[in-house]
Amino acid sequence: AFEKLFDCPVTDETMSFQKPSAGECHAALKERKVDFSAVERYVRATAVAVFARQAALAGSRLLGQDDECGWVAMAEELGFEELHSALKKCKPWDWNEAAKTQGEAELQEEAYAATVEAWFLEDVLPELETERRLALR
């Protein structure tokens, strides 16, 4: 299903020949290989982004406690430069401080979560869409 959806290159390689039975021709044993590298890249980018979002939502939000920082670094290490830039815009401490102006704890939590979701929708999802389009080529 993935190979058709993402138009992954497929090759058949002859691995060996099967010894024929009496009166039969040689039969080649072939191995089918599918290059899923484009899909794998998209899945990696998506996983990093989703875990960074979750770290922003569930992290400590304390100054100096960059719970999402590992995911930001992983995006850079895996070569997702644009995703890395988008993830660096995640500022849980700043967002939490801004949410504290909302009064009640429940309203603060809602304001913080809304800020995280806005960051994810505006900054991160466009980069994932770019990765998806690259995978579909």
Image (spheres, helix red, strand yellow):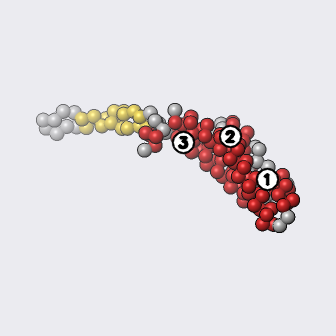
Residue 129 at what x, y percent from top left? 61, 40
Image point (54%, 42%), residue name: 40
Image point (79%, 49%), residue name: 91
Tag of residue 108: none
SS for callout 1: helix
Q: Which residue is mark 3?
A: 40
Say left or right for 24 vs 57. Answer: left
Which of the marked residues, 2 or 1, is nearer the chain's N terminus? Answer: 2
Q: Which residue is mark 1?
A: 92
Crowding near pointer 2: few (<14 within 10 Å), some, many (20+)?
Answer: many
Crowding near pointer 1: few (<14 within 10 Å), some, many (20+)?
Answer: many
Image point (77%, 62%), residue name: 109
SS for callout 2: helix
Image point (73%, 52%), residue name: 116
Tag of residue 83: 2
Residue 113 at what x, y percent from top left? 74, 57
Which part of the image, by quadrant, shows the N terminus? Answer: top left
Residue 107 at what x, y percent from top left? 79, 63
Say left or right for 31 vs 7. Answer: left
In three-dimensional space, the C-alpha distance between marks 2 and 1, rounded to whole angstroms, equals: 17 Å
Q: Amino acid at mark 1?
A: Pro
In three-dimensional space, the C-alpha distance between marks 2 and 3, rounded to whole angstroms, equals: 16 Å
Say left or right for 82 vs 131. Answer: right
Residue 110 at what x, y percent from top left? 75, 61
